Image (cartoon, rainbow, N blue to C red):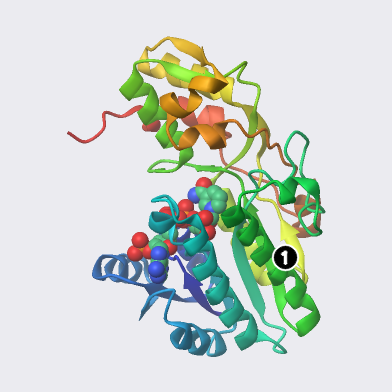
Amino acid sequence: MRVFVTGASGWIGSAVVPELLGAGHQVIGLARSDASAEALAAAGAQVQRGTLDDLDLLRDAAAASDGVIHLAFKHELAFSGDFQGAADADRRAVETFGEALAGSDRPFVLASGLLGLAPGRVATERDGRDPDPAVAAMAAGPATRLATAQWVLALASRGVRSSVVRLPPTNHGDGDHGFVAALVAVAREKGVSGYIGDGSSRWPAVHRLDSARLFRLALEQAPAGSALHPVADEGVPIRDIAQVIGRHLDLPVLSISPEDAGEHFGWLGAFLAIDSPASSALTRELLGCQPTQPGLIDDLDQGHYFRDPPA
Ligand SMILES: NC(=O)c1ccc[n+]([C@@H]2O[C@H](COP(=O)([O-])OP(=O)(O)OC[C@H]3O[C@@H](n4cnc5c(N)ncnc54)[C@H](OP(=O)(O)O)[C@@H]3O)[C@@H](O)[C@H]2O)c1
């Protein structure tokens, strides 16, 4: 297939591109900078220069493709305080892709998230389709992202083989700059490896190479309207993560009170507090695949998260 991929230069995208090329697909990756364009070309992809705001360009690129995988998200904007602005830009790009692909029966695969989908219980692929109290309790930006994912699932009724890959909060691996890397950085800075309260909040987890394989399988096989969970560890207690970090950095492992979590963990505190385990049983059955990479604790024990940071 000739596949248009946004976010192809990112953490997930740089694993998805070789996965697609290795399976014989042709990749056209969106790049907004020279550095991203060079990285994509070096990986063997064709480069489409442009940004998420170039809606005409996105429409044409989708129309000229056999399928679209949308991984780009304005994280810099989202994490500098304007999550809503990032979610709104994402919605505009997604609607553009949906309109371009309507009636074609071609695949459109959207990256979305699992955190907070069904707090306090194990989320399944059946969750997150209808309005429910957990969703109503979300902040506006994350609620917009969830609504966008629901819109994509509904494209199934408009002749798009749409699917949503709901990523766990950690897609771990060597070179990770996400939540777990941020937790390691806080431990180094504070001199303690902390968790909130009794540390029993659970996060699902997956290795990014297993996520990448699921994006390829979604593109190739997922029936229209599929919600998919690339989950290897159903729920790892944050306390267990903190203990491994403490052991590797030789730091004390301590409970931080919920009142002090914001001061201690900064922006990460709100995410660490969410108990959000998730199952992937239905995804494994639907696509006939199992994760093959190390789980989160084993991956942490490989040591790459604890190399000395650059001076
Ligand atoms: N990583 C995780 O653990 C995780 C967990 C849950 C959900 N997700 C979701 O999965 C998707 C991929 O995440 P990721 O970790 O790979 O993110 P990432 O490493 O931050 O990569 C983001 C990608 O989007 C591109 N991008 C950002 N702003 C853009 C713009 N204005 N125009 C065009 N491209 C733009 C970036 O391009 P540059 O290379 O030029 O910066 C990069 O390729 C996102 O939707 C993310 O929210 C990820």
Residue 209 seen in the current view: no
Q: At 42% from the left edge and 33% from the top edge, which residue is drawn?
A: 266
Find residue 259 and report its horizontal and vertical position in percent: 53, 21
Residue 120 seen in the current view: yes
Q: Is mark 1 within 8 Å of ligand 1?
A: no
Find residue 148 and report its horizontal and vertical position in percent: 65, 66
Badge 1 crowding class, 10 Å Cα cut-off, few under 14, some 14 to 19, many 20 or more, is some
Find residue 279 and report its horizontal and vertical position in percent: 75, 42
Q: Is residue 83 left or right of residue 282?
A: left
Where, quadrant-wise, is the C terminus in this rendering? top left
Q: At 61% from the left edge and 66% from the top edge, which residue is drawn?
A: 110
Q: Is residue 74 left or right of residue 281?
A: left
User: Quadrant of the rendered structure where residue 157 is?
Assistant: bottom right
The residue identified by callout 1 is 150
The local secondary structure at tag 1 comes to helix
| Ligand 1 placement by image quarter | bottom left
Q: At 72% from the left edge and 84% from the top edge, which residue is drawn?
A: 105
Q: At 61% from the left edge and 49% from the top edge, which residue is drawn?
A: 139
Q: Which residue type carries mark 1?
A: Gln
Where, quadrant-wise, is the N terminus in this rendering? bottom right
Q: Foreground: 12 or 179? A: 179
